[in-house]
Image (cartoon, rainbow, N blue to C red):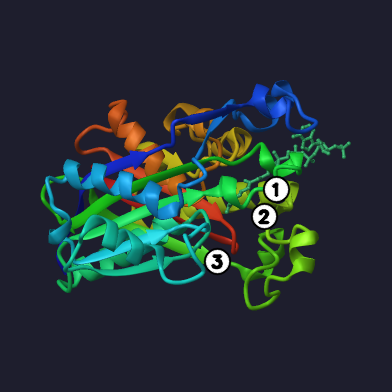
Amino acid sequence: MRKVGIAGVGAYVPSKILTNKDLEKMVDTTDEWITTRTGIKERRIADDWQASSDLAFQAAQCALADARMEPKDLDLIIVCGVTFDYPFPATACILQDKLGATKAGAMDIEAGCTGFIYSLSVAYGYIATGIYDNILVVGSDVLSKITDWQDRSTCILFGDAAGAVVVTPFQGQGELLNFYLRSDGSYKDDLLIPAGGSRNPPSHKTVDERLHYMKLNGPEVFRLAVRVIEDAVVALLERAHLSKEEISLFIPHQANIRIIQTAARNLGIPLEKFFINVNLYGNTSAASIPLAFYEALKEDRIKKGDYVMLVGFGAGLTWGAYLIKW
Ligand code: ACO
């Protein structure tokens, strides 16, 4: 097996900012409620014309430039998310065409907000076994397009973004060491879009009943999120034979500051060891972890040789963690 590393990191957020004050004018809510319950102050919203592949394209270009690589160098493109351009074809194919990555295969992976961790593990497998050399992994989501802007319990939570990495044989940076993936589909009803797929095909009735928008059982997902973050962190530390003290930075899925605070407290890990940017972007689903990873690097929170753990949870229920040595 070959060692595998991250050769480049990139991200993109739309320029339009939607603040809590703006939301006060749209639904019955307050800046104070949103801030104290979630830690979110503002989020980015894509333009009408922007779909998942448009955000992914910007993040991909940024990651490719960081890796000093051309699109034609790519062997495979993986896009993860929950708001793909179309039910089919894959958004990864649309990105392949936009980039002009003429030698790359392309596929989407859907694992909710844990998509980036799942996708990294797939890239790892191809590269470790020598099948491919250069794989682009992009987490991209435009949650504003599946948000019910009349539902105050969900519309305050989400934002749009994309984050990307280029994964290659290890070149001295960002070694992908170990991962942990789990799922429990019995919780599928706690976070889903009820209609639009083969279970409830789209119809006038499903649209009238607003079933094409995301539905969330907030308190239940909160409880599950805390439990599965703890599970993933403990399991991956055990698998990697490391102690929590040896991890320099945890990069959790950015859903709610209170979820991160509670998990950190239960794990006995200082909150300062958790990178947090949910205040600026809200929950950006599959983009959340790569965007936070990108910002952590830009802010110099990750030094050479540091152990970094990505940890996420999302619709499915899915959850998992990835250990990287920078
Ligand atoms: N403004 C004001 N009041 C509100 C709002 C709002 N925006 N939203 C809900 N409320 C009210 C409710 O109606 C309720 O009022 P009631 O007590 O009179 O009935 C009260 O506030 C409390 O509501 P809860 O839902 O119990 O509030 P909670 O403290 O649980 O916070 C929240 C809600 C923020 C959604 C929280 O449960 C949460 O973060 N859950 C996890 C969400 C999450 O992580 N999702 C992951 C998605 S990942 C993916 O795959 C996309």
Relative height, residue 129 to residue 7 (above, below): below
Q: CA distance from mark 1 to mark 3?
A: 26 Å
Residue 151, relative to residue 29: is it above or below? below
Per the image, label 3 sits on a secondary structure element best described as strand
Mark 3 residue CB less than 8 A from any atom of ligand 1 = no
Q: Nearer the viewer, residue 214 or 227?
A: 214
Q: Looking at the picture, how far across and down is residue 82, in whole percent?
A: 52, 58
What distance separates the C-alpha of mark 3 from that of mark 2? 20 Å
Q: Which residue is located at x 58 percent, y 45 percent?
A: 144
The residue under label 2 is which amino acid type?
Met
Amino acid on which the number 1 mark rests in the picture: Asp
User: For mark 3, what is the residue?
Assistant: 183
The answer to whether residue 237 is seen in the rendering is: no
Q: Of the residues under marks 3 and 2, which one precedes in the sequence?
A: 3
In the image: residue 205, left or right of residue 1: right
Question: Pointer 2: what residue?
Answer: 214
- Disc number lying in front (1 or 3): 1
Q: Mark 3 is on which residue type?
A: Ser
Q: Residue at x 54, y 33 (%)?
A: 43
**Along the viewing direction, whichever of 219 and 234 lies nearer the viewer:** 219
Q: Are marks 1 and 2 in contact (CB under 8 Å)?
A: yes
Disc 1: which residue: 148
Q: Nearer the viewer, mark 3 or mark 2?
A: 2
Quarter holding the C terminus is top left
Instruction: Tell me if 296 is positioned left or right of 72 in this view.
Output: right
Q: Quadrant of ligand 1?
A: top right
